[in-house]
Amino acid sequence: METRIALIGIIVENTESVEPLNQLLHEYGSYIVGRMGVPYSKKHVNIISVAMDAPQDVINALSGKIGRLPGVRAKTVSQAG
């Protein structure tokens, strides 16, 4: 199956969603190339970037699940098809 390179930008405003977010990232861990998290205490958020190499449907599924977590926003950029 063809894969794409993608970057998911995540902003976490609700700290109660951190554990479910980490569980999702662990579940999709075989597709994750790298991850960087930066706590930004001045604005009371956590900023996370996740680089992936996965089929488009897997990228869409993870991004959608992340975006449904309370107080979490996600945007995805992927390699052109």
Image (spheres, grey):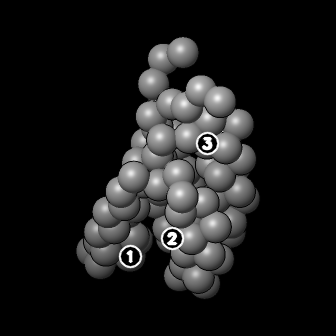
Residue 11 visible in this rendered orientation of the protein: yes
Q: Amino acid at mark 3?
A: Ile
- 10 Å crowding of disc 2: few (<14), some (14-19), many (20+): some
- For label 2, the SS is loop
Residue at 68% of width from left, 66% of height from top? 69
> Circle 1 is placed at which residue position?
44
Left or right of 17, for residue 45: left
Left or right of 59, for residue 13: left
> Circle 2 is placed at which residue position?
13
Contact between labelled residues 1 and 2, with CB atoms less than 8 Å apart: yes
> Circle 3 is placed at which residue position?
59
Q: CA distance from mark 2 to mark 1?
A: 7 Å
Contact between labelled residues 2 and 3, with CB atoms less than 8 Å apart: no
Indicate which label's residue lies in the foreground, 3 or 2.
3
Residue 60, horizontal then vertical, whole percent = 67, 40
Q: Amino acid at mark 2?
A: Glu
In the image shown, does 27 or 77 lie closer to the viewer?
27
Q: Amino acid at mark 1?
A: His
Q: In terms of image quadrants, where is residue 24?
A: bottom right
- The first of marks 3 and 1 along the sequence is 1
- For label 3, the SS is helix
Q: CA distance from mark 3 to mark 1?
A: 27 Å
